[in-house]
């Protein structure tokens, strides 16, 4: 892939002005010029290529929305990297907070029980299901896990999730579908490891 030559400050200034006037091609040029550096910042925070790709897209979306606030007297690339780092820090904090709340979101009391008063075996099976579900969620990339938890456990609508994450609804639906597929795969592998018990696990909130 060819690498674009660095753009002069005057060219960046012109592209920004065109972006603010609604020129999509100008924004594409800015993204193409700086995408690798923003991706590198994201990758240092998450350590996974796919997750860094998603985070890079989120960063550029939020940068685009705040482009009008950029002080033209400053260096654009310096501002962009600073914004990227701050957004990555926010992402890290939200992921850490989400991990702390997963145990509360995936609570045995919120899952249906086989009988109104389950016996000891049923309670053990229920705890097993919850444990596997927690492990499956923890194995997901943070971006996908957030979407699945908000939709299938917190039962938020697509529009509510889109608003909370600052993303288009189509992106939210895509992440939920990808997250469900990956979670189902994780649970299937975990279920095979527990197949000796002869118990079939059915996980609420995970829609095929």
Image: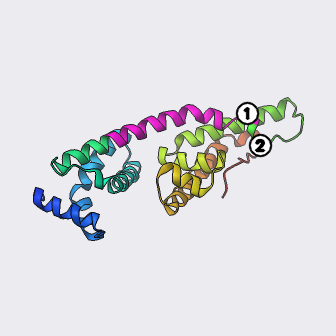
Q: Position of residue 66 (x, y in %)?
A: 33, 52
- Please tell me in which quadrant of the rendered image residue 12 appears: bottom left
Where is the C terminus found, in terms of image quarters? bottom right
For label 1, the SS is helix
Which residue corresponds to mark 2? Answer: 199
Give the main secondary structure, helix, strand or loop, of the magenta stretch. helix
The magenta stretch spans residue 24: no
Q: Is residue 33 visible?
A: yes
> In the figure, is residue 19 to the left or right of 170?
left
Residue 127's tag is: 1
Residue drawn at 44 percent across, 35 percent down: 93
Residue density around tag 1, few if under 14, some if 14–19, many if 20 or more, within 10 Å = some
Task: Look at 26% across and 42% down and name the residue there.
Answer: 82
Q: What stretch is highlighted in magenta?
A: 86-109
Vertical placement of residue 129 versus 176, above or below: above
Dot 2 or dot 1: first in sequence order is: 1
Task: Classify 122 as above or below 9.
Answer: above
52 and 159: which is toward the camera? 159
The location of residue 36, given as percent across then percent down, is: 25, 53
- What residue is rendered at 28% in x and 49% in y? 38
Q: Which of the two residues, 201 or 176, is positioned nearer the viewer here?
A: 176
Q: Residues under labels 2 and 1: Cα distance?
A: 13 Å
Image check: 10 left or right of 96?
A: left
Q: In which quarter of the image is residue 122?
A: top right
Residue at image coords 62%, 33%: 103
């Amino acid at each position: 892939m060819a690498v674009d030559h660095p753009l002069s400050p005057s060219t960046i200034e012109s592209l920004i002005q065109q972006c603010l006037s609604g020129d999509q091609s100008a924004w594409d040029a800015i993204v193409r010029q700086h995408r690798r550096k923003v991706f590198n910042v994201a990758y240092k925070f998450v350590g996974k290529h796919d997750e860094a790709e998603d985070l890079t897209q989120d960063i550029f979306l939020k940068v685009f929305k705040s482009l009008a606030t950029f002080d033209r007297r400053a260096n654009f690339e310096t501002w962009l990297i600073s914004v990227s780092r701050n957004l990555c820090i926010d992402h890290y904090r939200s992921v850490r907070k989400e991990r702390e709340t997963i145990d509360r979101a995936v609570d045995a009391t919120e899952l249906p029980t086989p009988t109104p008063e389950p016996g000891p075996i049923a309670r053990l099976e229920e705890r097993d299901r919850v444990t596997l579900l927690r492990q499956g969620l923890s194995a997901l990339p943070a971006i996908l896990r957030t979407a699945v938890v908000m939709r299938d456990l917190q039962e938020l609508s697509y529009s509510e999730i889109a608003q909370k994450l600052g993303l288009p609804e189509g992106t939210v639906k895509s992440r939920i579908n990808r997250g469900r597929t990956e979670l189902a795969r994780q649970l299937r592998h975990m279920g095979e490891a527990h197949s000796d018990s002869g118990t079939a696990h059915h996980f609420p909130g995970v829609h095929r």
